Image (tube, helix red, strand yellow):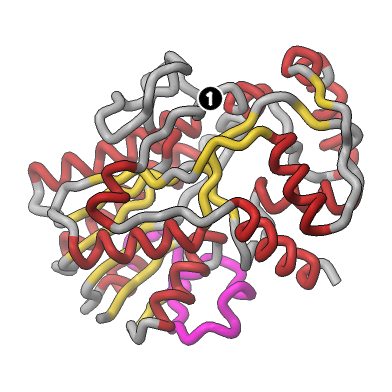
Amino acid sequence: MIIAVTGAAGLLGNNLCRILSEQGHEVRALIHHDSTSLEAVNVEFYKGDVLNLDSLYLLCEGADAVFHCAAKISIDGDPDGSVFKININGTANVIEACIQQNVARMVHFSSIHALQAEPHTDVIDEYTPYAGPKAFKYDQSKSQAEQLVMEAVETRGLNAIVINPTGIIGPFDFKPSLTGQLLLDLGKGSMPALVKGGYDFVDVRDVANAAIEAMLNSVNGEKYLLSGRWYSIKEIATVFSKISGKKVPKLVLPLWVAQLSLPFIRLWSKISGRAPLYTRESLEILKHGKTISHVKAEKELGFKPRSLEETIKDSWAFLKELKK
């Protein structure tokens, strides 16, 4: 099959391209700036941007399927409007290109953040309502983008599947992602303390494999939540320490204490030029996600997330080499 991938250079995109290429598909990778993560992968590079419709027409021409991975992740609002622009307008453009170029199937990577997180005790599944206007900007953007896809399925003849992963972690994390940066900070010993709370994390390779299965065998208009298991930040640090041999902080701060330190974290971020791991949004997120169901994906896609130990082992092995 000829398969196009937007956001191909990212953590999810490049892992997806690797698996598709290994399976013998002809892979087209949409690259905006940096193609480093795909230099050793058998793909055809297409220079472009989800905000440039002409580049998407070229990417999708003659393609059998399109995986839409491109998105801007944010745990700090949308100060310049780019989160909404890329996530919503970019998705609208991919939909248009798929329809105009008669692509047989689009797989849209949404997010667990597209769904309502309150109340914290409810099980989150495929029937959970969308995040509303009071949600964080990133959540709103993913919610609105997913709804655009579903509306196009219902009214414009688009053949599409929606995938909602939780917190993605795994190897080939070149940028690195927020989860990759967490492991690097633990490895460098640059975290004076951990914070209470946690999140549901899932291996990027398990997400990619399930999405490919959905592309091949799912009914038009279906959506699947791909979760792993909820882990506290302390659990992640403990597993990391066991695998890496690195000492990790023993002190675990309550979230309210971490919130008091946010002004200092933001100041350090400006001085260092590095985006902070902890923001008001990320600390709020650490209260969520204890009960996210992947039962549907397990039954229909054979989805079976691997252990956190395997994921962190492979992630750390890659990150160590990346930073040499």
Vertical relation: 143 (above or below) 156: above
Residue for point 82% across, 58% down: 244
Assess whether residue 151 is covered by the magenta stretch.
no
Quarter of the picture holding the C terminus: bottom right
Residue 17: x %, y % from top left = 45, 73
Residue 289 lies, in percent from the top left, at: 50, 29
Establish if 174 lies above or below 36. Answer: above
- Circle 1 is placed at which residue position? 288
Q: Is residue 174 visible?
A: no
Q: Residues within 10 Å of mark 1 (few under 14, many from 20)?
A: some
Tell me the quarter of the image containing the N terminus.
bottom left
Q: In front here: 49 or 137?
A: 137
Q: Residue at x 24, y 75 (%)?
A: 63
At horizontal 58% and vertical 67% (from top left) the residue drawn is 33
Pinpoint residue 280: horizontal percent, then vertical percent.
67, 22
In the displayed structure image, the side of residue 281 where residue 113 appears, left or right: left
Q: Nearer the viewer, residue 172 or 309?
A: 309
Place of residue 212 in the rendered image (x, y in percent of width and height, measured from the top left)? 32, 65
Residue range highlighted in magenta: 29-54
Q: Is residue 43 magenta?
A: yes
